[in-house]
Image: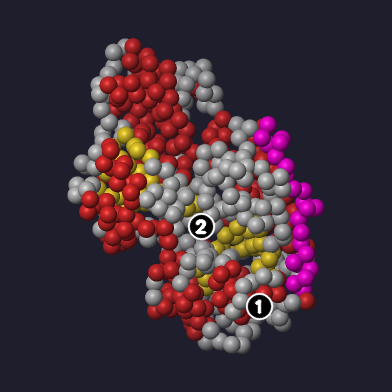
Amino acid sequence: MKDTNRPDIENFVKTLWGKKGNFVPICELGVHPEIKGKIIGRPVQSLQDDVEFWYKAGYDYVKLQPIADFNPMNIGTGSNLTFKEDGTLQRKWASESQGVISSWEDLEKYKFPSKEDFNYSKFEKVRELLPEGMGVIGQYGDIFTMTWEMMGFEGFSMALFENPELIDELNKRLGELVLSMFEYFAQSDIVDILWISDDIAYTNGLLMGPDVLDRYFFSWLKKIGDLAKKYNKPLIYHTDGVLWDVFDRIVECGVNALHPIEPKAMDIKDVKERYGDKLCLIGHVDVDLLCRGSKEDIRNKVRENIEKAAFNGGYCIGSGNSIPEYVNFENYIALLEASKEFGKYI
Amino acid sequence: MELLERLAECIETGKADEATSFLPEQRGEKGASELTMEALDLGFSPGEILSEALIIGMNRIGDKFSSGKAFIPNLLISAKAMKAAMIHLEPFFKTGEAQYKGTFVLGTVQGDLHDIGKNIVKMVLQGSGWNVIDLGTSVSADKFIKAVEENDAKFMGMSALLTTTMLNMDKISSELKSRFGDLKVFLGGAPLSQQYCDKIGADGYFADPRSLVKYLETY
């Protein structure tokens, strides 16, 4: 990894619009704080530390979220559900059976935040911390995911048949809250790119039927896509899994770039052939490879992905999901270095 | 419609009982629970009801799931109907009058708390006539050993969601297979592959529960 970095948000944005820039950017949705700390040589404890990580690692952006607590009354924390530091539901372990909301009574008792509770101070503070050439991604999501997590996966599945109106109302409340974040991102002069993450599929197929996804996810994605279009900012969408049955919907909603093209689910060559003219593709270096592969494996995979997907622009290098703490750090460095080695257009 | 075929259809569509109301075309009609009781009253054997109706219904929805025409919620609602029917058959399994196809020990591997995938496998296996011993999540080798021994199980399955927890399968699989020579160990979950399964000497990797069931039918 080279000592001097020149972030180039314009090159990154150009790539997200599906064009060919000067080089192939790198892009991640999430990097674990432990990995970030290894890059900057100390724990990441402030916004400044975080900016330093994204800069030193060679990214063209800082990714920011508003501080939001979706469970201000800590309802259900005694159960098998866990919550992240910002109060949002832990998405690492999907909740089985019943969640915190399984009835109208539960819904009425639950304390939702209001959009005025969301804290956007990082978006204001980052202004004075950004190195030249570096931009900002505003990211949030999980409208669909939070809906089923709060009901429990089985609870949600049963309610689809037995109590769909309950899902409608919960989804509406969560959707309006998250949409307000994207309204902020779209209108903010410090935010260059919008990123929504919300898993709708897994290795073998969609989590739900397309009709269910239309109702509880795509309707919101369209609203967010319309916002992005109105304010002329590219929209990235993250979901794992096999997406062939919903690619057209994703494009119709106004998504410009798709992440992470999960390697076990889809081949990037196939995706590029069929949708490369409509979507910028991001990712596709398997997390398992980053964990258990060799540095040479990583280098070869980066080169292969660039050959398959970056020849006419519209591709960003990255993992096939995220960089968790258990990724081999040397392999993550190998990813960054290979990106620099092979990513320049001649 | 012939009784067993009606029962199979109730399992496939998830009509657990007469009160199930989300299927407008079947409102007010008997569901899986009532039809199972009626079949028993008419002299159908529990084994016949299971193999000629319940398993048929679960297989149909399982096949639709495998081909992407049905999704996890459809499996779950069918499993609910299956449970409603099985309540009436369970006494016959306890007396030995009806037989399961075999016993399958199932759990999410040690260190892993994910269980949605495992639960779906459990439902599909039960729906196919298997007795499933579900050990839950984060299951150690000792717990698997105890369950296999106590139930004289010949088949077990482990699932994992993460690369890190998947690696625990190696030790557990080796320990179980060296202890029980005729035990078959199957693997499933997002990070898994046939390559990893072969590497650690397990007996099969299955991307979906229906393909596991079809494989088990060869035994």
Q: What's the amino acid at mark 1?
A: Glu
Residue bearing mark 2: A240
Question: Where is residue B179 drawn, in percent x and y?
Answer: 22, 50
Relative to A13, does residue B35 appear above or below in the rendering? Answer: above
Question: Where is residue A36 drawn, in percent x and y?
Answer: 58, 73
Residue at image position (69%, 43%) is: A172
Residue bearing mark 1: A52
Q: What's the amino acid at mark 2?
A: Asp
Name the quadrant of the C terminus of chain B. top left
Residue B39 appears in the rendering: yes
Residue at image position (62%, 55%) is: A84
Residue at image position (61%, 76%) is: A42
Q: Kindly report the secondary structure that dominates the magenta region of the rendered protein.
A: helix
Q: Earlier in the sequence, mark 2 or mark 1?
A: 1
Residue at image position (66%, 50%) is: A220
Question: Where is residue A168 drawn, in percent x and y?
Answer: 65, 38
**Where is residue B191, by image quadrant?**
bottom left
The answer to whether the residue labelled 2 contacts the one labelled 1, judged by CB atoms less than 8 Å apart, is no
User: Rounded to the nearest whole Å, what is the CA distance between mark 2 and mark 1?
Assistant: 28 Å
Magenta highlight range: A105-127
Question: Are the numbered discs 2 and 1 placed on the same chain, yes or no?
Answer: yes
Side of B50 where A176 appears, left or right? right
